[in-house]
Amino acid sequence: MQSSLRQRLLGALLLVGSLLLGSCAGKSVYVAPGTTTQSGTYSDTDMHMMAAAMYASLQKKLETVVPAGATKPIVALTHIDNKTSEHMDSDVLADKLQIEMIKAGSLRFVDRSKIRDISKEFDLGGSGLVNPDMVKKAGNVLGADFLLAGDMTSISKSEGRNQLNFYRLSMRLVQVETDEVVWADDFEIKKASTKGLLDW
C-alpha cells in the first residue's frame, strides 16, 4: 500500500516536472514580414515604423526643397549611428529608408558600398557632419547634392519585473554646397514590458 502510494506520488511529481519543463522550453514559428510583433526591445516592427515615419517627413520636405520639374537630387545616405544600449544593425534601417525613397522616385542615391569607404576616410559617422570642409569634400567625391545621416538612441528603465524602453531616431539632410541642414526630424517609440516569472 505504501509502495503504491509512493509510486503514485513519484508519477505525479514526474508529470508536474515534465509540464514545467515543457512550459519553459522555447519554440519558433515563421512570421510573415511586416507582421506586428510584441516585444519590449527593438524589433523589425519598430524599424518599419521608423523608416515609414522618416520617409513621410522627408518626402513632404522635398516638395519645398526641390522645385517641380527639377532634376532629382543625388543623396548619399552616410550612416545611422547606433548609440543605443542594444546591438542592432542600423544599416538595415538605412537600407529600408533608401528603398522607400527609391520606390517613390523622388531622389537618386549613391551606392552605399561606396559611401562606407568614404565615410571612414572623412569621418562622416560622427564629427564629420559638423565640419563644412569635410561635408563638401565628401559630397564632391561622392557626386552628391545632399548628405543624409542619423542617430539612434535609447533609454532603458526597469523596476522589478517592469521595464520601459525608449527609442529615438533622429535624421538630418545636409546640403553639400552650403552645409545647411535643410531638413531634420525625429521619431520616438516607447515600449513597456513585464518579465515573466521564468524570464530572469
Image (tube, rainbow, N blue to C red):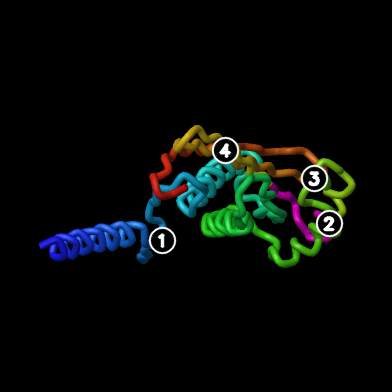
Q: Position of residue 34 (x, y in %)?
A: 41, 56
**Highlighted magenta segment, given as a residue range:** 138-149
Q: Is residue 86 left or right of residue 41?
A: right
Measured Cα–Cα span from mark 3 to mark 1:
34 Å
Callout 2: SS:
helix
Q: Position of residue 20 (x, y in %)?
A: 30, 57
Cβ atoms at labels 4 and 1 below 8 Å apart: no
N-terminal label among 4 and 1: 1
Task: Give the label on residue 190, or none.
Answer: none
N-terminal label among 4 and 3: 3
Specify the quadrant of the image occupied by residue 138: bottom right
Q: Which residue is mark 3?
A: 129
Q: Is residue 141 left or right of residue 15?
A: right
Measured Cα–Cα span from mark 2 to mark 4:
40 Å
Q: Position of residue 51 (x, y in %)?
A: 54, 49
Q: Position of residue 172 (x, y in %)?
A: 68, 42
Q: Which residue is mark 2?
A: 140
Looking at the rendered structure, the kind of residue marked 2 is Asn
Q: Residue 182 versus residue 188: which sits nearer the camera? A: 188
Measured Cα–Cα span from mark 4 to mark 3:
28 Å
Measured Cα–Cα span from mark 2 to mark 1:
38 Å
Looking at the rendered structure, the kind of residue marked 1 is Pro
Task: Give the label on residue 33, or none.
Answer: 1
Task: Give the label on residue 156, or none.
Answer: 4
